[in-house]
Amino acid sequence: MTVGQFVTGLFVGIALCASQATALAQVAGNLIIAGNGPEQRTIEALVRAFEKANPRAYVDILWDEDSKPLQLVNTGRAQIAVTGVEDPALAATQIGWDGIGILVHLSNFTKEVTKQQVADIFSGKIKEWSELGGPETKLLLIDRPRNQNVREAFETQLGIEGKIPDSAKMIDADEVVVKTVVGTLPPLSAAAYISLSTGLSAVSGGVAVRLLAVDKVEPEVPTVKDGRYSLRRPLLLLSKKEPNSLVEAFSQFALSSPGQTIIGEIYVPMPNK
């Protein structure tokens, strides 16, 4: 090796070390993630794995059913909001899909509906199950709090923003929704919308509930993933549009193979490119 080659190699080595140091610096610091929906368990698992892979990164989670994650990001109190609807003022990274299941009691005569019928049910236009081929039983609607992203995505997709009747029973958590559908009298009267993962888990666990097919498509992971089941919402990470290396690092981790594996434990991961 000549002196020139040695010097060149030395400079290359120094440049590589500097590059690695910069990469490490980009994933160091504090990050706050805010949310209010059913994704908390998945986000917590992502954060644990991310911090393990990046020991100099520290992530706090602000999760409250009554919080407004977008407001927290806009005011600088959080860097990432977990939601299901984009905001034009913020940058969005989609990390997965969540189907929205229409849940009824197992004894309900209705097996399938159209997307328009779902809109008519939850906007109060359809008031009895007889209008869907069932008995003359009044529909009992189960709704979700206005600030929850599952409701926002549900209303937006169906074009029924602000049209769900005030008489609908308001319930926060998916698990309580399932129990309410099972315990409502008469049993076949209740109709609810729910995160598909929770609904599928209840059905497979033998709970006396059913998920309705929509437009003749069964609500399942493959049909949500390829878009055949259209009643779905994206899992989004929203952040301010100015560059933030830690936000970018977390978003990329969520889209990496380990991150998508974590997301796939409950939700539908992104299609392979």
Image (cartoon, rainbow, N blue to C red):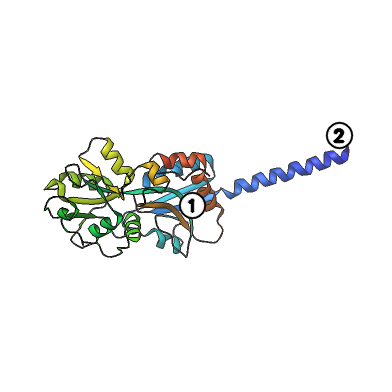
In the image, taking residue 139 as reference, residue 79 lies left or right, namely: right
* 10 Å crowding of disc 1: few (<14), some (14-19), many (20+): some
Counting residues from the start of the chain, the first of labels 1 and 2 encountered is 2
Residue 108 on image: x %, y %:
17, 45
In which quadrant of the rendered image does the N terminus lie?
Answer: top right
Residue 239 on image: x %, y %:
48, 58
Q: Amino acid at mark 2?
A: Met
For mark 2, give the secondary structure: loop
Residue 1: which numbered mark, if any? Answer: 2
Whole-angstrom CA distance, mark 1 to mark 2, is 47 Å
Q: Nearer the viewer, residue 109 or 106?
A: 109
Give the residue drawn at x 51%, y 40%.
257
Q: Amino acid at mark 1?
A: Leu
In the picture of the structure, the residue carrying the numbered disc 1 is 31
Give the residue drawn at x 35%, y 58%.
157
Q: Relative to residue 167, is residue 266 depicted above or below?
A: above
Give the residue drawn at x 69%, y 43%.
17
Residue 241 on image: x %, y %:
52, 61
* 10 Å crowding of disc 2: few (<14), some (14-19), many (20+): few
Residue 64 on image: x %, y %:
33, 53
